[in-house]
Amino acid sequence: MARRSTGTKRRRLLLTEVVERFLRDVEVQHTLDTLISYRHRVGVLADLLANVCQLRYLDEVDVDHLRRCAQHLLTSKIDPVGYQGHPLENGSTLSIATVRGYIAVWKAFFSWCVLEGLIDNNPADARFKAPKPVKKVKPAFTEDHIMKMLLVFDTSDPIGFRNYVILVLLLDTGMRLSELAGLHVQDVHETYVKVYGKGRKEREIGISPETRKLLWKYVNKYRVPADDQVTSLFLNQSGGPLSAASVKFLMRYVRQEAGLDDIQLSAHVFRHTFAKMYLESGGDLFKLSREMGHSDVRVTRIYLEDFGSTEARKDHASYSPIARLNLKKQPGRKQSRKREK
């Protein structure tokens, strides 16, 4: 049997064709929210390569083209309709943080292309650098913010009670929005909830007794599914699963009704507030990292850059090693009875 010639030319692949193959692979390995994010961000890349760089084929792309695409996102006016959910600076350009998110997905795409043998060299290698992030203090809710938000709801009303429980659960667990929307009744246990985070990784997050009581009351009194097949924990008014988009709408409503003009209201701010208050109460950083679903404790530290020395010292007496040693029993080395003359 004749061998295939090793000099056979590789068929040129259209960028749009490769993007669809990549997304099919993402669909198998990741959650629906991740797929939506990847589809949008890789789709933007394909559009930019076609319209800004006039490229159609995968093998045409080099690092300079990617730099031009990134620069376009940073400097050109963006149609907000096409970039839903992303923060805008001055109503015109995407923030550096958002562009960094795009670039992270672009790098994942080209790494996949190399792994699949579609290209030999990665144009998004170490030479393609994301813009440096602007260091900002991450916002967190004060106790006053939290009380104003919770007072918005009429807890005698089924929807009002559901919304109240959602906010309490976010504050008590610091879970991501996608994790909240993905909860099912069977994920709620006596002392914890089971969530499925990034990369479909399962983990357990502890809940307080008060939160457990609220969840029990919601499930047994106010939760009315459209049929027995609906197992999602939080339901909409029709008895179907409550979507992440609906929770975002709820956040906007609460912010307006509570009159919170000095801070944004999102699941991410709840997440940061949870982390900060957890440490202020003497919680362990490594345990916090696991509950938040971080693969590395260094990621957790990013959430806590505004945790200043004033907060850190408040419980010093409770956690100081001196408090454990009980120095009263060993008052120090006794002086010699007589000094040498």
Image (cartoon, grey):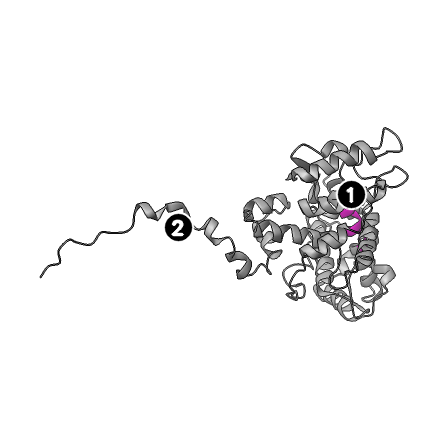
Q: Residues within 10 Å of mark 1 (few under 14, many from 20)?
A: many
Relative height, residue 216 to residue 30 (above, below):
above
Residue 155 part of the magenta segment: no
Q: Main secondary structure of the magenta part?
A: helix
**Left or right: where 302 falls relative to 47:** left
SS under mark 2: helix
User: Along the line of sight, which residue is nearer the eye, 169 or 288?
Assistant: 169
Which image quarter: residue 241? top right
Please, what is the three-letter code of the amino acid marked with disc 2?
A: Ile
Q: Position of residue 203 (x, y in %)?
A: 65, 38
Q: Residue at x 36, y 46 (%)?
A: 326
Q: Tell me if residue 258 comes above or below residue 174 in the rendering.
A: below
Q: Residue 1: x, y in percent?
A: 73, 35
Q: Nearer the viewer, residue 186 or 102?
A: 186
> Is there any visible trace of residue 269 in the rendered image?
yes
Q: Residue furthest right?
A: 238
Residue 31 spot, x, y in % from top left: 75, 43
Q: Image point 30% across, 47% down: which residue? A: 330
Label located before the other in sequence (2 or 1): 1
Q: Which residues are magenta?
A: 31-40
Q: Which residue is mark 2?
A: 322
Q: Is residue 313 left or right of residue 206?
A: left
Task: Say whether residue 26 is visible.
Answer: no
Closest to the observer, 295 or 319: 319
Question: Which label lies toward us, 2 or 1?
Answer: 2
Snapshot quadrant of residue 198:
top right
Q: Which mark is residue 181?
A: 1
